[in-house]
Amino acid sequence: MRTVKQLMDMSGRTALITGATGGLGLYIAETIAELGGSLILVDKPSTNYSALIGKLKQYKCSTKCIDCDLESDKQRTDLINTIKDKDISVDILINNAAFVGTTDLKGWTTSFEDQSVDTWRRAIEVNLTAAFHLSKELYPQLKKSGKGSIINIASIYGVSAPDHSLYESTSMGNPAAYSVSKGGLIQLTRWLSTTISPNVRVNSISPGGVFRNQPKAFIERYEKRTPLERMATEEDFKGIIAYLASDMSRYVTGQNINIDGGWTVW
């Protein structure tokens, strides 16, 4: 029987991570590198990977950086073709990239009546369609691995409805497209888990609110509603990534795991 350390060893495995330079993506990449894995880092064109590459140097892991705007079907296809044409192995696919919009994006953090169909489509394309597209086209590589795993980064707002009172007196909001796309990603996780088993395991993580210097009023309301009485930090997700990416979870598939300080218990 293998030890816990042996089960967590990811030597010889390669993880493709979308949205790799974002707050959570960076910590996901670092976790895989710490466990001995290799990395394919995917992010939008013109992304500066230097900070992430600098942080990963200490782990001496193999790293490839590929630009891809996941909102573009053509760019996703180019990414897939690059991986296939160069016969790059992919053992773990982490669909982390997300369309989160900005407060000044038209039709996003506004009233339901003013939310736009165009912005809805953009969110669905990045948060759901891209995950389906990459999972479908990279399935042969994942199957060939023998230890293939897909990890979808969803959200607690794909699990439960938002409490809009949290956002009062702030410029923040919770658009329908974000919640719906993340809920769809959780269901895609379940669907894939029974469709491509036993060759590839598929699970999702639903993070709760991550502290990123949000308005004080929002933070106070959020923490008051959370049993652990704080917002998450990126470090809080390293354990679950290590678990789902490694053989520690080799008998786990089709699960959505809430990492939310107890938010969804209520």
Image: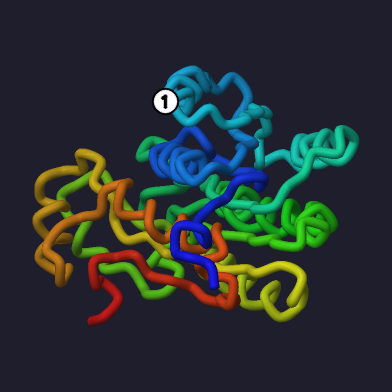
Instruction: Judge whether residue 112 can be spotted in this image.
Output: no
Give the residue drawn at x 79%, y 59%.
Answer: 139
- Give left or right: position of 34 versus 233: right
Q: Residues within 10 Å of mark 1 (few under 14, many from 20)?
A: few
Residue 245 lies, in percent from the top left, at 55, 58
Q: What residue type is labelled 1?
A: Lys
Give the residue drawn at x 34%, y 65%.
Answer: 259
- Give left or right: position of 223 versus 62: left
Give the residue drawn at x 29%, y 65%.
Answer: 260
Return the residue at label 1: 55
The quarter in which the N terminus is drawn is bottom right
**What is the total number of numbered labels drawn onto the structure image?**
1
Secondary element at tag 1: helix
The quarter in which the C terminus is drawn is bottom left
Say which of 74 and 83 sits in front.
83
On screen, residue 111 above or below 227: above
Residue 226 lies, in percent from the top left, at 17, 68
Residue 201 lies, in percent from the top left, at 65, 69
Q: On the image, which quarter does residue 216 sit in?
A: top left
